[in-house]
Image: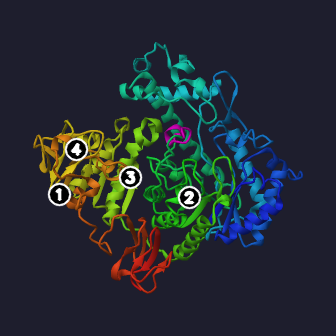
Amino acid sequence: MIGVWFGNFFEPFYSDRAAVERGIAEVAELGFTSLNLDSKPWEDFFARYRGEPASQYVGMQEFMIQQARSRGLDYTHLALYLCGDNLYPTIRDVPPVRGEEAILPDGKPMGTYKYWSPAAQKTMVDHVAGLLKLYGNGMFRRSDDRIVMQTMFDPIPKPSFDEEGRSRYLAWLEKRYSGDVTKLNEIYGIKASTFYALTPDQYWLRPKELNWVECAVPSAQDFEARTADFHRWIDNQTYLASEMESYFATMKEKWRELEPKLFIEPVLHQWGYFFNPPGQTIWPTAKRALDVYRLAPHVDGVLYITSPLNAENRADAMAVSVEGSILRTANQGREFTAGLYLGRHVNGDIYSVVPPSEAIATLVASGAGAFHMYGYSGLDDGGVLFRMDGVFKESLSTGNRWAKEVIPLIDEARSKEVAILFPREMSLYEPLEHDVGGRHRMDLLGWYSQFVDLGWHVDILHPDQVEAGGLAGYETLVVSHNSLYDLGDNSRLEIAVKSFVEAGGTLFHGPKCALARRAFGIEETTTAFDCFEMIEEVIPHGWSTVEFAKGNQIARYLRSGRSAIAETSHGAGRVISFGFEYGYAYTRTTMPIVPPEYGKREMHPIVLLKQTPVELLAGAAPKALFRPIKGVECARFGRHVVIVNHRSSPVNLGGIIKPRAIHQTPSAGGWLAAHSALYLDINS
């Protein structure tokens, strides 16, 4: 299934049948196999279920279905939009069917669903049942005959301030504080007699700023000082995350009752999961209380849309690889669908740097078995594929053709070698605007890129997975920066990581790593910025500099002579401690210059070294098929190999390219074209 979202909110696709016919013909020509219809639960769909005539909007979707089938395409539906956006007050002229809405503190409807309401949940089930009844025959079916239902798009749970919603939250809060209102009073700076005496302004962060999608966030100073508003925010978001998880668990049982059988595959995020677009404050996961790993057990497939955009707002194919890794590990061995944004992104023309074919190949290398692409026509927040130029469309067609040929050949699991710990607390609680320059997220990207550049296979594991034994089979664990690690209950995680290292694993980490301190007693001292020596003299790059008093000195600061990088032994394994944010240094857009006090001495940042510290410490992947090349990603699935060249120059892969190699773009013998990919069967 290589599906593309095709919206008919706007003209010409709202009422111009000739335009729709041309558009769907182009969708087929571009290599898509499936059409995704935006069929959210509006009243005109329910009227159609009752046998009434089709509205203009519903009628056009029925025409789109007919056109798709005439060209050999099947279709799927975006059936529900749980953030309330399906109102589209300036676009749609019919109301949504919500069943029951969340209520604002002033008693007015919030314009979104009450997630825990049986009435709201019933409308969703009724809507999907109606779609199945009217249109089920042509819907995409998996090999097990289950119909793929993409039942939601960007869920955003919200509180409700009616009596029932208020009691629900306060009961949760009472349990969270073990019934001790004195403790809550101390943290919140209030004097409540009981939990149920709390007012909305006392228990929710600035509730007057709530609407169907937005909410208040604490200031950077609140985060720094851990003020009462900070703690309100943490409690609020923790509660909403629990409601989100509870909702999915409840709905899973309701979907199972429907016939024909469904494969529930929500579209959980629209604009990138870990790399939310900078400046777009309504999209970050921290505002949406979204942790896809926690939702994974309650859906048949974890799916979200990504794009080649990193946390510094730069086009970057490696950001797609990171999010593909999260998709793969969140799905825990299940075949998964990858989501990809297509078109001119709200933050720039990213595909002028990263061709669509490269982004598609990167997700195939991540292990994707299908695609959901957004989108052909939308105009409001994307969906502008139909307006893109011929070069873009040719690359997209090339990517789709190659993916359709290669994906069915890959029938083995991807290699496991290096794990990066997903920064759970940072992702859930840190508003994007407080991650200065995206540096916290860039630290993970840099660690990921460094190991991929050395030929290693890298997975991103959630703490819950590590606690459950998920590190089995890995050689190395990286702990990238997690600004809010202390907010989690991580004692079991620390036990699991300690056991991994003592059994022979290697742990890499940077400054302010509470996990390393708690699990291994790693002590650090803040020090003035300085360069260090490790074969070459190196200029570090980060936002903090620390030194280590204990352990084997791997690299020394030039002025103090103390450890900039230290190694400590623990059982059969080791912990490598870096005194600066290594991942950030590896992938940062700017580079530091030689500090003035060192005059004309030759020293360089990480990215210009002949051998990086991680290369010296971890080496190139021993099972790599070729000498690793920076910017060239290699993914091995048993005998199957996918290689993606993220560079703007062709690369010489020597003698590894077999006669039966499937090139995405034709290349000279032994070469892989720039921003392109190839597939190999190394046994053929």
Is disc 1 placed on a helix, strand or loop? loop
Residue 79 forms part of the magenta stretch: no
- Asked whether the beta carbons under mark 2 and mark 1 sit within 8 Å of each other, the answer is no
Mark 1 or 4: the one toward you: 4
Work out how far the residue at label 2 is from the one at label 4, CA to CA, in angstroms: 36 Å
**Quadrant for the C terminus in the image:** bottom left
Apparent side of residue 397 relative to residue 55 in the rendered image (left or right): left
Comes first in the chain, label 3 or label 4 = 3
Task: Report the amino acid beneath label 4.
Answer: Gly
- Quadrant of the rendering where the N terminus is positioned: bottom right
Disc 3 to disc 4, how far (Cα)?
18 Å
Q: Tag 4 or tag 1, which sits nearer the N-term? A: 1
Q: Residues within 10 Å of mark 2 (few under 14, many from 20)?
A: many
Give me the residue at 60% from left, 51% from top: 252
- Left or right of 558 on screen, residue 309: right
- Mark 1 — residue? 572
- Specify which label sits upstream in the sequence, 3 or 2: 2
**Crowd rating for badge 1 (residues with CA inside 10 Å; few <14, some 14–19, many 20+):** few
Mark 3, residue position: 445
Residue 589 location, x and y as percent?
38, 50
Relative to the observer, which residue lies in front, 421 or 247?
421
What percent of the width, then of the height, locates residue 469? 35, 55
Q: Which mark is residue 340?
A: 2
User: CA gap, disc 1 to disc 3?
Assistant: 28 Å
Residue 55: percent from the left, percent from the top? 85, 50
User: Which of the two marks, 1 or 3, is nearer to us in this view?
Assistant: 3
Magenta stretch in the rendered image? 280-289
Real-space CA distance between mark 1 and mark 4, rounded to the nearest whole angstrom = 23 Å
